[in-house]
Every structure is written in structure tokens, then in C-alpha cells.
């Protein structure tokens, strides 16, 4: 065999070995299933129920029937539920003691209306708004990133409101996320497998935060695969929010 041919063969073998190593590394990335589902009732019935509860609260004097009606409504919609659109109930929560101070995204859909699809819309604790990636295709590789100060309470739960949940029409017409690649402090952590449901999806993957070197915690959620919408090729995440420890 000529020396030149040997060099070419050697380079080819190295390329094959490197490719195989990369493939094995990708295959070893752990995959996680949803730990629990959290039901969010965004129906017109629920909205009317909360409005009626508030109306009865404002009455100075209630009839016996109204007292019974109010008790029934409070059982269904407790005082801590101020609106169907609130992701987190009123009262003390994990967010009372901290939360992320920055949210960014690789792209966002531009809107011709007053509706804003930037990453802050997936960080406002509202089911009315959503982040929409801004690529021409379904947005594989696009990401949203949350940054937490080192003093922020530690995270034990990541909850994702997948798709455009504000209405059934918006949810079915737009893409939802099927798989998310999670990065923790710029290091690949694993693949989150999401269900095609409007219910919030809770993942418990361990404890994040309070880095020993005092640095910020950065969680990046990258779109890896989608459920296709019926009309638009835009991928939507309504909200990513968190729960955890170190809260009074």
C-alpha cells in the first residue's frame, strides 16, 4: 500500500471512530418522562364561577341561598384562585423567595398585533400569553433560557405548560413541543419527553441551584421535536415555571 493511501485510510478510520463516539455520546443522553400532570381549568364555566364568587363576596348581606352558593363556589374555586389565567395561586409560593432574574430566547415570532411572543411571555405566570419561536420552520434547535441568582431558592420541580393553551383553537392550530433538550449551566442534562396535553407537565429531575462556586444557575430548554399544529408551523410554550425548597 502506498504511503498516501495509508494516510487517507488512517484519516477515514479516525473520522469513523469520532463519528461513532459522538453518536454513542448522544445515545447516552438520559430521557425523562413526565412525573405528574397538573390540571388547569381554563373554561368559560370556571371564569364565570370565579366572577360569581367575587360578586357574592362584595355583597354586604347575603341571603341563605347566596351563602350556600358562595360556600359551593369556594369549594370549587378557593380564595387563592384569583383568575383562571393565573399559573400560580395567590398566597406564598416558591416565587415569594426568589425566581429567575433573566429570561432570553434564541428567537421570537414577530407580531403585527399588540400580542407579544417574546420569552418574557413564558415567564409572566399567565396562561394568556406564550413564547413562540421565530424561525420559518418548526424551530428545532431554538431555545428559551432562564437564569437564576445563586441566592435564589433551589429548584426541585420544573413545570411546563406546553403549546398555546389559552384556547382549544390556538392549541390545536400551533405546534406543541414533543421533546426538549435540557441544558444545566451549558451542559447537556437530558431529554424531557412531553405529552400532547393542555395540562401542565411536572418533571422532578433532582435539585438545581446554589452552585458551590457561587455562579448563577442557567437552565436552557431547546426544542428537539414537535407535535405538528393543524394550521401554523410555529412552536409554542405558554409557560415554564418552577417549584422547590428554601421557601419559608
Image (cartoon, rainbow, N blue to C red):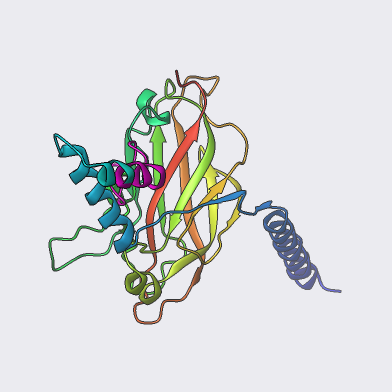
Residue in the image at 41% along x and 59% along y: 142
Number of dots carrying numbers: 0
Q: Is residue 208 left or right of residue 150?
A: right
Q: Is residue 36 left or right of residue 57?
A: right
- Can you give x and y, in whole percent of width and height, for residue 220 in the image? 46, 46
Q: Is residue 153 magenta?
A: no
In the image, 220 versus 199, the foreground residue is 199
- Can you give x and y, in whole percent of width and height, for residue 47 in the image? 28, 56
Direction bottom: furthest residue = 231
Residue in the image at 28% along x and 41% along y: 67
Q: Is residue 242 left or right of residue 121?
A: right
- Can you give x and y, in whole percent of width and height, for residue 209 in the image? 51, 28
Residue in the image at 46% along x and 24% along y: 153
Q: Is residue 92 above or below residue 13?
A: above
Residue 219 seen anywhere in this rendered image of the structure: yes
Q: Is residue 209 above or below residue 235?
A: above
Q: Is residue 222 left or right of residue 105?
A: right
In the image, 71 versus 133, the foreground residue is 71
- Can you give x and y, in whole percent of width and height, for residue 71 in the image? 35, 41
The quarter of the image holding the C terminus is: top left
The quarter of the image holding the N terminus is: bottom right
Residue in the image at 39% along x and 26% along y: 149
Where are the magenta residues, as a range?
69-86
In the image, 12 versus 122, the foreground residue is 122
In the image, 179 versus 69, the foreground residue is 69
Direction front: furthest residue = 64
Q: Is residue 98 above or below residue 132?
A: above
Q: Is residue 74 magenta?
A: yes
Amino acid at each position: 500500500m502506498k504511503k498516501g493511501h495509508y494516510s487517507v485510510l488512517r484519516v477515514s478510520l479516525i473520522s469513523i471512530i469520532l463519528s461513532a463516539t459522538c453518536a454513542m455520546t448522544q445515545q447516552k443522553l438520559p430521557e425523562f418522562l413526565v412525573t405528574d400532570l397538573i390540571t388547569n381549568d381554563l373554561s368559560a364555566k370556571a371564569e364565570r364561577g370565579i366572577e360569581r364568587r367575587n360578586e357574592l363576596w362584595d355583597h354586604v348581606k347575603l341571603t341563605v341561598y347566596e351563602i350556600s352558593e358562595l360556600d359551593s363556589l369556594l369549594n370549587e374555586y378557593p380564595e387563592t384562585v384569583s383568575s383562571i389565567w393565573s399559573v400560580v395561586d395567590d398566597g406564598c409560593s416558591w416565587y415569594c423567595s426568589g425566581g429567575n432574574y433573566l429570561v432570553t430566547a434564541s428567537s421570537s415570532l414577530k407580531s403585527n398585533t399588540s400580542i407579544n411572543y417574546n420569552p418574557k411571555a413564558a415567564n409572566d405566570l399567565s396562561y394568556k400569553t406564550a413564547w413562540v419561536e421565530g424561525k420559518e420552520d418548526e424551530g428545532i434547535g431554538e431555545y428559551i433560557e432562564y437564569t437564576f441568582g445563586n441566592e435564589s431558592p433551589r429548584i426541585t420541580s420544573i413545570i411546563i405548560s406546553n403549546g398555546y393553551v389559552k384556547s382549544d383553537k390556538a392549541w390545536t392550530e400551533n405546534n406543541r413541543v414533543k421533546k426538549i433538550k435540557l441544558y444545566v449551566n451549558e451542559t447537556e442534562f437530558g431529554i424531557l419527553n412531553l405529552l400532547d396535553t393542555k395540562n401542565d407537565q411536572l418533571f422532578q429531575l433532582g435539585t438545581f441551584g446554589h452552585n458551590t462556586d457561587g455562579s448563577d444557575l442557567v437552565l436552557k430548554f431547546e426544542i428537539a421535536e414537535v407535535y405538528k399544529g393543524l394550521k401554523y408551523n410555529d412552536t409554542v410554550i405558554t409557560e415554564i415555571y418552577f417549584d422547590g425548597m428554601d421557601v419559608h
